[in-house]
Amino acid sequence: MEISENGAIVETKFGKIRGYRRNGIYTYKGIPYGASTGGKNRFMAPQEPEAWTGVRNALSFGNAAPQGGGLGDPMRPDFSHFSDWFTYDWAEKRYDEDCLSVNVWTPEINNNTKRPVLVWFHGGGFAGGSSIQIEAYIGENLSKIGDVVVVSVTHRLNLFGFLNLGAIGGNKYKDSATAGMQDCVAALKWVNENIASFGGDSGNVTIFGQSGGGAKVSILMAMPAAKGLFHKAVTISGAMLKVASYDSQAEKAHAFLKAAGISPTNIDKIQDIPWQELYRITRADRALGSMVYAPCLDNLHIPRHPFDPSAPPISAGIPMIIGSCTGEQSHSGDNPSLEDITFEELVERIQNGRGGSGLFVGNLAFGNRTKDVIDAYAKVFPEKKPVAIWSLLGGRNSQLKQAELQTANGGAVYNYWFDWATPLYDGRPRAYHNSDLPFWFSTTDVMDTMTGGGDRPRKLAEKMSLALASFARTGDPNHEGIPYWPKYDREQGAVMIWNDVCEVRNDPDREARELADEIRNSNS
């Protein structure tokens, strides 16, 4: 570790900042790209931060955006199962409306080097998370292994980022429905204007994100204001095809204002109430708490769906990596009794409407043809137990649809499936949602609570992070350490399967997937 009063100083548009150097990588944390979003700026478009004099320390992470799930939250989820605070090492963060900040990791500063830039958008849907949510997101190792500049972004979430007040409060609140996504664009503008001082190439920027972060990447591809601010894109378990409707989000805003005792005639009161009280209103009522405040078609900043009915023309030619995990749902991860379920029991469960719930289950309404679908998937993966086949039934249609549409849009697309099973918790979770995060960032030892640590995950992490860095550099993820990874096309459907032994297969689940889709469509 190297830290000095006079070392690691970089000049940005708004003033000088001081970072530190560790393991050959310069680190800068909590750099403001926007002003506080509280008070008169609440529900408004992001504003530039005030410039400062002297040198500002960029040595600690900034605030997380206001959200719940922490101590004292009446709807804090039960973390008693495998994906609990032990696995992810969640920490109680500082929550504040002064939350628009970026973090930067880079091998060199203040020179004419032009390294590829990777800009990370965190998961947590549109409701929670931050750029410092878990240590898997730390960009130091990815920067060093890939010789790239890594940037991570924190932005507004939930009602503070997506409460559609425009239909109620008029022109003043026209930006409120998509403010959180406008933050993401503002962060990319900061990168465009400042990254050269960090050794990055503003003309070679890749945006990447997982889960909700992948959805944000998808949306950015359809936002006119983001055009030209990035050149490649990666959606990790987060291919989003459509956003919410304007009217549906307006209805949620009406319900919130009613619960808060705010009428349309005194709507400006919403900028004076402490954010904690506003958030508490959403959590005190189960009906309000279940509402999802998300980006919508506001016909201003988001004028069309990201990938429906086609890929966005403004992102024509953008190369992409698109994929997911084979065990996204991981049914037995927190329920060991399901680990040894038989195929007969699985058929019975699904036929009786007990197929599960959640983001990654999909429509499992196969009726009396349930066994046919399960048999089709078991044929593709004969080594997988029934509980693992169960996780595959939700399909990967969104990822493949996005891949097909962007291919038609002129962009080279590379498709993958992450199939590496964690050895922890008796191996039950397998390749579950989030489990690939430490591999993309090469933080498998840091996140040994997810991977077990050691050589086995580290070897795969190096392959995946180098593929990501190669893609950021050239638009092609291939490198010497992996089998040749062809571009995706509908006819062949090439998919890289990440595991201890990596292999490329041509659309291995096509027959099973098409059968499942045919049955779903006939039953709808």
Image (cartoon, rainbow, N blue to C red):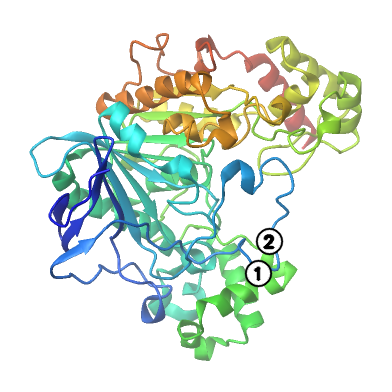
Q: Is residue 152 visible?
A: yes
The foreground one among 477 and 19 is: 19
Q: Residue at x 41, y 54 (%)?
A: 303
**Disc 1 secondary structure class:** loop
**Residue type (three-letter) at the residue carrying disc 2:** Arg
**Apparent side of residue 290 relative to residue 227 in the rendered image (left or right):** right
Neighbour tally class for label 2: few under 14, some 14-19, many 20 plus, Cα within 10 Å: few
Q: Give the answer, above or below, for where 355 lies relative to 468.
A: below
**Disc 2 secondary structure class:** loop
Which quadrant: the C terminus? top right
Which image quarter: residue 413? top left
- Residue 118: where, in percent of width, then height? 31, 38
Q: CA distance from mark 2 to mark 1?
A: 8 Å
**Apparent side of residue 392 relative to residue 277 in the rendered image (left or right):** right
The foreground one among 492 and 125 is: 125
Give the labeled residue for mark 1: 72
Which quadrant: the N terminus? top left
- Residue 394: where, in percent of width, then height? 69, 31
Q: Is residue 301 visible?
A: no
- Residue 154: where, in percent of width, then height? 40, 56
Q: Give the answer, above or below, for where 249 lies relative to 398.
A: below
Circle 2 or circle 1, nearest the eye: 1
**Residue type (three-letter) at the residue carrying disc 1:** Gly
- Which residue in the rendered view is the most extreme toward the bottom? 266
**Tag count in the figure?**
2
**Apparent side of residue 406 relative to residue 417 in the rendered image (left or right):** left
Q: Which mark is residue 76?
A: 2
- Residue 461: where, in percent of width, then height? 45, 24
The foreground one among 377 and 5 is: 5
- Labelled pair 2, 1 in contact (Cβ < 8 Å): yes
